[in-house]
Image (cartoon, rainbow, N blue to C red):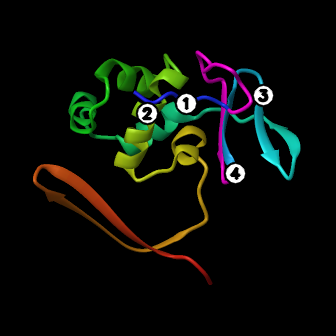
Amino acid sequence: MPKFVSPLCTRPTDSLKSYYVGKLGAFIGNQNQTQIFKNKLIFVKKEIKLSQVLQRELKGKILSRVAKEIGVSVSILHDWYSSSRKPSAKNMWQLKKLADYLGLSLEQILFDEKVERQIISSTTFTDRGVQYRVNIEKVKG
């Protein structure tokens, strides 16, 4: 199981109160989020909106089936859905699997931020029991 550790920390944090993934790297912090930009430290704090995103994206789906389909713990998925637990560094790999299943980035699933991209076409298909989603995006104007 991969560990998700900030380059600025010596050990993974137990609970994510703040989290940021940027183009230059990923950082986790309990009080403040830290991003390195041109050798300067920038502190940012964002509210985690995972529960709201899951309630919207998984509406009408059975959580235990979703968890089994993507290979994550049913209890963790339920806790995230009901907002009784936030993601931790230990289960970040499960959050990534869930984000991939929903076709979202980590920023989108954690903070409910819309990424400026235009999907021209999208299709979902299954091959040998594995479900895939293919998106065609407009990259430049």
The residue range painted magenta reads: 7-23
Q: Give SS at disc 2.
A: helix
Mark 1 / mark 3, whichever is N-terminal: 1
Label 1: which residue? 4
Q: x, y percentage for residue 86?
A: 53, 22
At label 3, the amino acid type is: Asn
Towards the viewer: 95 or 89: 89
Report the disc number at residue 24. Answer: 4
Q: Do residues under tags 4 and 2 come within 8 Å of each other at their CB atoms?
A: no
Kind of residue at badge 4: Leu
For label 3, count other residues whose C-alpha is less than 10 Å away and answer few (under 14), some (14-19) or many (20+).
some
Question: How many C-alpha atoms fall within 10 Å of the one at disc 4: few (<14), some, or many (≥20)?
Answer: few
Check if mark 2's residue and mark 1's residue have beta carbons within 8 Å.
Answer: yes
- Residue 85 location (% of width, % of height): 50, 18
Task: Look at the picture and state if 66 lies above or below 104.
Answer: above
Q: Relative to 32, is 120 on the left or the right?
A: left
Tag 1 secondary structure: loop
Question: Which circle's residue, 2 or 1, is located before the other in the chain?
Answer: 1
Label 2 to label 1: alpha-carbon separation = 8 Å
The magenta stretch spans residue 106: no
Badge 3 marks a residue whose secondary structure is loop
Badge 1: residue crowd in 10 Å (few <14, some 14–19, many ≥20) = some
Q: Amino acid at mark 2?
A: Trp
Residue at 18 percent of width and 50 percent of height: 130
Q: Are marks 1 and 3 in contact (CB under 8 Å)?
A: no
Which residue is at 71% across, 21% downward? 30
Distance Cα–Cα, label 2 vs label 3: 22 Å
